[in-house]
Amino acid sequence: MSEPWQYEAEMHGIYQEARNHRNAFWDKLAILDGGTVALVITAVLGQLRGAIRHSHLIGAGLTVLVAAMVST
């Protein structure tokens, strides 16, 4: 039979790997959110400036998105 410490070391490795995957997911999501914010700001300040009807909704959405990025 294996020693109890070997089981604990194996479980710690499994938990560590799961944490690494979860952190990688949130990091990728934050990068995607940042890209979305940059793209929308570029569109709003660029050629689409006059074509956007509900700019206050875009501002509110970007505010919520940035708040979600900061809280991650």
Image: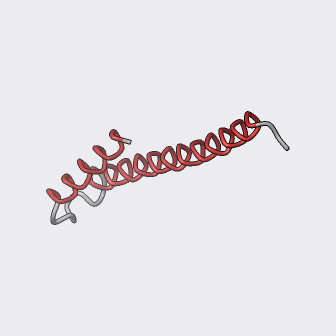
Q: 2 or 55: which is nearer to us?
A: 2
Q: In the visual, does 72 lie left or right of 20?
A: left
Q: 49 or 28: which is nearer to us?
A: 28
- Which residue appears at 15% of the width and 63% of the height? 54
Spot occupied by residue 28 in the image (x, y as percentages of width and height): 52, 48
Q: In the visual, does 14 lie left or right of 66?
A: right
Quadrant in the picture for the C terminus: top left
Spot occupied by residue 40 in the image (x, y as percentages of width and height): 33, 54
Spot occupied by residue 65 in the image (x, y as percentages of width and height): 30, 50
Spot occupied by residue 57 in the image (x, y as percentages of width and height): 17, 59
Q: 42 or 13: which is nearer to us?
A: 13
Looking at the image, which residue sits at the far front? Answer: 1
- Which residue appears at 30% of the width and 45% of the height? 66
Looking at the image, which residue sits at the far right? Answer: 1
Q: Quadrant of residue 69?
A: top left
- Which residue appears at 67% of the width and 45% of the height? 14
Quadrant in the picture for the N terminus: top right
Q: Quadrant of residue 19?
A: top right
Q: In the visual, does 68 lie left or right of 54?
A: right
Q: Quadrant of residue 17?
A: top right
With respect to residue 3, does 36 lie above or below?
A: below
Q: Tell how many labels.
A: 0
